[in-house]
Amino acid sequence: MSSKPIKIAIAGVGNCASALLQGIELYKSEEMAKEPIGLMHYDLGGYKPGDIEVVAAFDIDARKVGKPLREAIFARPNCTKIFYSDLPDYPVTVQMGPVMDGYSEHMKEYPEDKSFVLADQEPVDVAKVLKESGAEILVNYLPVGSENAARAYAKACLEAGVGFINAMPVFIASDPTWARRFEEKGLPIIGDDVKSQVGATITHRVLTKLFEDRGVKITKTYQLNFGGNTDFLNMLNRSRLKSKKKSKTQAVQSEMKEGLVDENIHIGPSDYVPWLNDNKICFIRMEGLGFGRVPIELELRLSVEDSPNSGGVIIDAIRCMKLALDRGVKGPLYAISAYTMKSPPIQYTDSEARKMVEEFIRGESRSEAKTA
């Protein structure tokens, strides 16, 4: 491992946080070091997964706030697959974060083991905790629709001098005003809305690019997703979905030479099926016109464990941000944002973004030229 750990804080100790921490510990083993199945990079610029150290964590659920981190990541309503249980006793207690719009009232209508239970505590001063913990990076895993709460964490990062990875669909890294604020503070930012390792969005994007590159005109498409974790339960409140639908739709539309009118494209969450737990099912349908304007249709079903799928991407985003901090790079990190996020500041094709990330890791990237 590197002599210097990567000190991170986590906002939202849910399934994604659980999968990430399990993965960090799993990939420390000698067996996984020899054959690191599931990683895009084992060694990324000199940093390995085991170099990541959690020094602070925030949540708003009564079963997590005030609890040791090791206990909290396995507490209800978390339901992701436990693929590595031998976790250390982290010297971190989960602290109460700002609630704001991070909690949807419809959660009260569902069983407690499936929904959020709001803790009756005053939120801590997030910026103060970040400073005292020595965190360098904060990963934002708040629920969809937590627009104000997400921005509160971003503001705390600016106050504390901490880099910000926005893994949820609130437009912060891709908002020029927020991007400028991080640049002015000499801090890097990655976002917005994590694009899983092999998930619905990247699969849909690749297929869209294939149709376009092979001369097929796409006329209609949909992407339907459903699952049984709190993310899907939270999204039953359709008023929280505006940014999510926009983020997923523009991620696919960006691969088209000419976008579709709204009535011919539907991308977004579909429903909540409790017994699926963290398993996410995706159905994609694409219709187009090929040679001779002859119709072509494609249908695909994808089944993934949602949170590990996210962890396989965030583990690289964290290490790329650490490289940016080491090098004094400030503002949006365009390459890794385009490769790991649905709504980055600048959209690139996934193959272009991958090439740019490799150049960034080697220190050759011209797109990340702004230094503090």
Image (cartoon, helix red, strand yellow):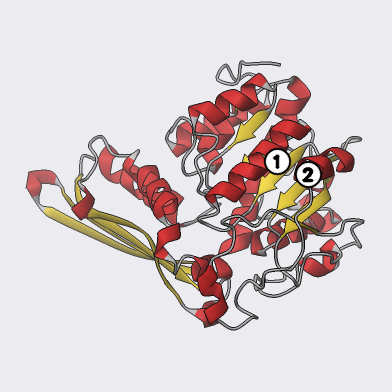
Locate residue 169 relative to residue 268 in the image: left or right.
right
**Residue 73 appears in which quarter of the rendering?**
bottom right
For marks 2 and 1, the one nearer the N-term is: 2
The residue lying at 44 percent from left, 52 percent from top is: 244
The residue lying at 44 percent from left, 67 percent from top is: 237
Quarter of the figure that contains the N terminus: top right
Answer whether labels 2 and 1 touch (C-beta < 8 Å): yes
Distance CA(mark 2)–CA(mark 1): 8 Å
Q: Is residue 80 above or below residue 148?
A: below
Residue placed under numbered mark 1 in the picture: 318
Label 2 or label 1, whichever lies nearer to me, is: 2
Look at the numbered disc 2 and give the secondary structure of its residue: strand
Look at the numbered disc 1 and give the secondary structure of its residue: helix
| Residue 197, image x, y percentages | 55, 52
Q: Nearer the viewer, residue 206 or 82?
A: 82
Q: Nearer the viewer, residue 17 or 170?
A: 170
Question: Tag 2: Cα neighbours inside 10 Å, few (<14), some, or many (≥20)?
Answer: many
Tell me which amino acid carries mark 1: Ile
The answer to whether one can see residue 79 in this image is yes
Determine which of the numbered discs, if any, sits on residue 8 in the image: 2
